[in-house]
Image (spheres, grey):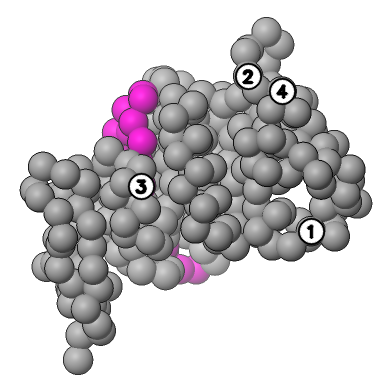
Amino acid sequence: MCIELHQLTLNQGHRTVVQPTDLHLHRGEKIGLIGPNGSGKTTLLKAIAGLHSPASGRISLDCHCLSGLAPQDLAQQMAILLQDQPTDLPLSVHDTIELAAMARPDGRAGPSVAELLAIAHLTPLAHTPVSRLSGGERQRVFLAQALFQAPQILLLDEPSNHLDVRHQWQLLQHCHDTIETVIASYHDFNLAAALCDRLILLVDGVIQADGPPQQVLTPANLKRHFGVDSERLSNDDDAPHIRVLGAVA
């Protein structure tokens, strides 16, 4: 299942946050969106999920215009984890994950709630209201909910937020290993490089670089677009490991 952006422009109020963009996202890719705050990553993910209407241009899903798809049909193809998840949800952890069953197509194989509770280390909290959880625990609940939906495409907006290092690597690696196509925004260069086979650098709504991590995460790109000096600690053929040396004076 491929996603195509055709001269897509996205606005927030009177401000253009994604400039006219053409982009082809291939089936089976693990794509990381990187860029400074306010670069348009979240808005772009919401548009792909059908939650933000384009100012101009269009998004196609397997050659079908996204705007012509019913929300239920779209939910059966993709799931999205946003940063602004509810914090006062009265439902239990188990029931919150199970809510995704409404968007899961009949007959599509996927993990059970019990399996996801175990994967996310939430089994002891299964009957606890989500409103009583910490930020990291809630993030794990909503990641598990997205996985229970058994989507073909998973969209993640800063999924490592609130997660400790162990859960960042374990849960996000599980997402990338089990979901066919993953598109996620990251602030952590090394996490993005390790998990993704393609990175898209978005700055002020314009794609500045697009390719394998070793081609995108260069000291020159990080200095120009993030304002930091850095060095790479891995070979050119490996996923780069970035060490930030400090802010550019």
- Specify the quadrant that holds the C terminus: bottom left
Q: 10 Å neighbourhood of mark 3: few (<14), some, or many (≥20)?
A: many
Image quarter of the N terminus:
top left
The earlier-in-sequence mark between 3 and 1 is 3
> Which residue position is annotated with label 3?
32
Image disc number at residue 133 = 1
Q: Which mark is residue 110?
A: 2
Q: Which residue is mark 4?
A: 112
Residue 226 in the figure: left or right of residue 180? left
Mark 1 Cα shell of 10 Å, populated few (<14), some (14-19), many (≥20): some
Of helix, strand and loop, which one carries label 3?
A: strand
Identified by mark 3, the residue type is Gly
Most distant residue in the left direction = 236
Residue at x 44%, y 25% (from the top left corner) = 180
Q: CA distance from mark 1 to mark 4?
A: 22 Å
Q: Are marks 4 and 3 in contact (CB under 8 Å)?
A: no
Please state which of the two labelled residues, at mark 4 or mark 3, is closer to the viewer: 4
Magenta stretch, residue numbers: 14-32
As drawn, is 224 to the left or to the right of 53?
Answer: left
The residue shown at (77%, 40%) is: 123
Q: Position of residue 137 (x, y in %)?
A: 70, 54
Q: Secondary structure at mark 2?
A: loop
State the CA–CA distance, disc 2 to disc 4.
Answer: 7 Å
